[in-house]
Amino acid sequence: MKRPPMLMHMRVEGHGRAFGLWLPLFLMLPLALVALILLCPLILVTTAILWPSGWGRRAWLTLRASVDMFCAMRGLSIDVHSGRQSMSVSVV
Amino acid sequence: MSDNKKKILEMLAKNKISADDAYRLLSAIDGGEGRREGAGRAETAVNSRAKYLRVTVLPNPESERSGSYDRVNIRVPMSLIRAGIKLTSLIPSEARDKVNLALHEKGIDFDARNMKPEDIEELIGALSDLEVDVVSKNGESVKVFVE
């Protein structure tokens, strides 16, 4: 499994002001794990109820694909400069 | 030799199937293995080659000096594109029909249902050869490439 991104850096600049933010995603991972453990019974029951209709499997696969997408975000970088405004997002 | 091939040859030896049937079955097995190996090789080649899709819009030097210009620099990991394409396979069939219909109306005959994992790798492999370089009249340059 791929490693999830550790940090996200955002920077917005314009009208003589600049705002930068480092988001420590690695600190959110334990919180997400706790939330997942707490919600685990609810997720399992919902999946079991929806499984015969096919939506349970789809929901399960979507959850997995979303985690894959989150892990694949490592290395994403967006830098847009327009006029005197600029915005950049990078995931490390 | 794989177990399946052995079984086919045993069936041929016991006259359970004809030589033509045996040939057809062996060809099918070879074709399947070849495709799997090919897809694996393509995936390895793509993984080792292309890492990011880059989109850049660079201004002309004059407007850059004046300070009023547009500049875009986007780097998208290929793994994110791969994950995104895989996510499309989870679109519910009802929604997918609507998407296909809307694409058909725009003249694009594309059915997301026919998308297989090996097709995704082939698509990303084809992206690695992509290079778009456009320079506009006012000197702005747009580049799309893979690195």
Image (cartoon, coloured by chain):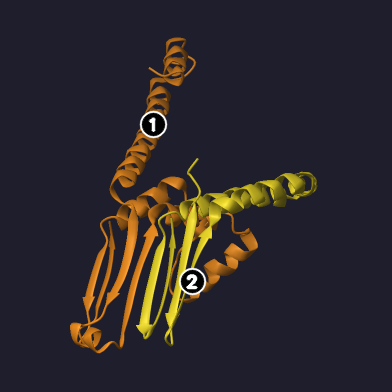
Which residue occupies the foreground of this view, B101 or B76?
B76
Percent of width and height locating residue B114: 49, 54
Q: Residues within 10 Å of mark 1 (few under 14, many from 20)?
A: few
Which residue occupies the foreground of this view, A57 or A42?
A42
Q: What residue type is disc 1 on?
A: Glu
Which residue occupies the foreground of this view, B12 or A28?
A28
Q: Colour of chain B?
A: orange
For the question of whether residue A43 can be seen, the reply is: no
- The image quadrant of residue B108 is bottom left
Quadrant of the drawing holding the C terminus of chain B: bottom left
- The image quadrant of residue B56 is bottom left
Q: Residues within 10 Å of mark 2 (few under 14, many from 20)?
A: few
Q: Secondary structure at mark 2?
A: helix
Q: Is residue B50 above or below residue B25?
A: below
Percent of width and height locating residue B97: 59, 65
Q: Is residue A49 left or right of residue B14?
A: right
Q: What residue type is disc 2 on?
A: His
Q: Which mark is residue B33?
A: 1
Q: Is residue B88 above or below residue A45?
A: below
Q: Is residue A71 left or right of residue A58?
A: left
Quadrant of the drawing holding the N terminus of chain B: top left
Percent of width and height locating residue B73: 33, 70
Q: Is residue B35 above or below residue B54?
A: above
Percent of width and height locating residue B131: 24, 64
In three-dimensional space, the C-alpha distance between marks 2 and 1, rounded to whole angstroms, equals 35 Å
- Residue farthest along the top direction in this orientation: B14
Q: Which mark is residue B104?
A: 2
Which residue occupies the foreground of this view, B114 or A15?
A15
Q: Which mark is residue A5?
A: none
For the question of whether residue B103 can be seen, the reply is: yes
| Circle 1 chain | B
